[in-house]
Image (cartoon, helix red, strand yellow):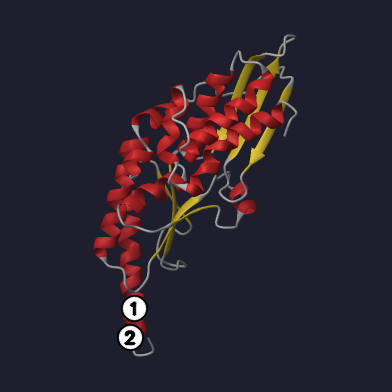
Amino acid sequence: MMGLDWTAVGNHEMGLTQRLMDGLVAVDGARLIGPAGLQGRFPVVSFVLGDIHPHDMAQILDSFGVAVRAGHHCAQPLMERFDLAGTTRACIAPYNNTSDIDALLAGVEEAVRRFA
Amino acid sequence: MTDALYHDRIVTLAKSRAGAGRLTDPTGSARKDNPLCGDRVTMDVRVDDQGRIAELTHQVRGCALCQASAVALTARAQGQAADSLPQLRAEIDSVLDGSSAGEGDFAAFAPVRPYRSRHDCVTLPFEALKAALGKG
């Protein structure tokens, strides 16, 4: 791990984060939680999509081979404050690639097709 | 597997929101939360002089399984004796553990069986109704 070029790793992760954010904002009803851009953001993207519950979203994404976290993330008071049942949260790591992002976005489309 | 879990009847039930709302004059009301997943169900019930569930409504902030379960339970419990809830609970438990097929829309929850972490999504409305009837 220490031999990795961490600047390159960071650029890789943030590039994927941008790809994911761009894909999500193009989906009707999708709402990103947190900064609209990359500034002030780690390679983590939380989102909600209309009335689709995060657990249903996560279950659909699982069938696309995409593992995300879903729910209130141990932050119930914050979720209450923003009147959210929870969020779906994707965390991007050095080993992820564009096909992972595209699989996630395909899963989101499937969730919309099924639930919206 | 997910196709089986979110089959057409489950999605139709969840989307219908049939029986959703609040009663103005309930004889009992209760809210139940699942602190692990954040699902929240409120049940209002009005029991008549004969001990029957005359009116029943639900308000759900939860996943599709929880929504569908609340709709199915509301439809089944309406008009039933208030003390019949344990039988309804036993029926849905038996669907989830695979020991019976269940009747009507309760049978729609059979595909949830392998997803242990989702069982509570289905049973939360039952817990809320039990509490609304003063037994929870």
Residue A16 vs A49, above or below: the answer is below
How many numbered marks, from 0 up? 2
Residue A36 vs A3, above or below: the answer is above
Q: Position of residue A32 (x, y in %)?
A: 43, 52
Residue B6 vs A103, above or below: the answer is above
Disc 2 element: loop
Disc 2 target residue: A5
* Residue B108, quarter of picture: top left
Q: Position of residue B57 (x, y in %)?
A: 60, 22
On what subunit does the disc labeled 2 rest? A
Disc 1 target residue: A9
Residue lying at 30% horizontally and 37% vertically, measured from the top left: A113
Picture quarter with the C terminus of chain A: top left
**For this view, does B39 lie left or right of residue A26?**
right
**For this view, does B32 lie left or right of residue B71?**
right
Q: Amino acid at mark 2?
A: Asp
- Of A57 and B94, nearer the camera is B94
- Of A105 and B49, nearer the camera is B49
- Of B15 and B136, nearer the camera is B136
Tag 1 and tag 2, C-beta contact below 8 Å: yes
* Residue B45, quarter of picture: top right
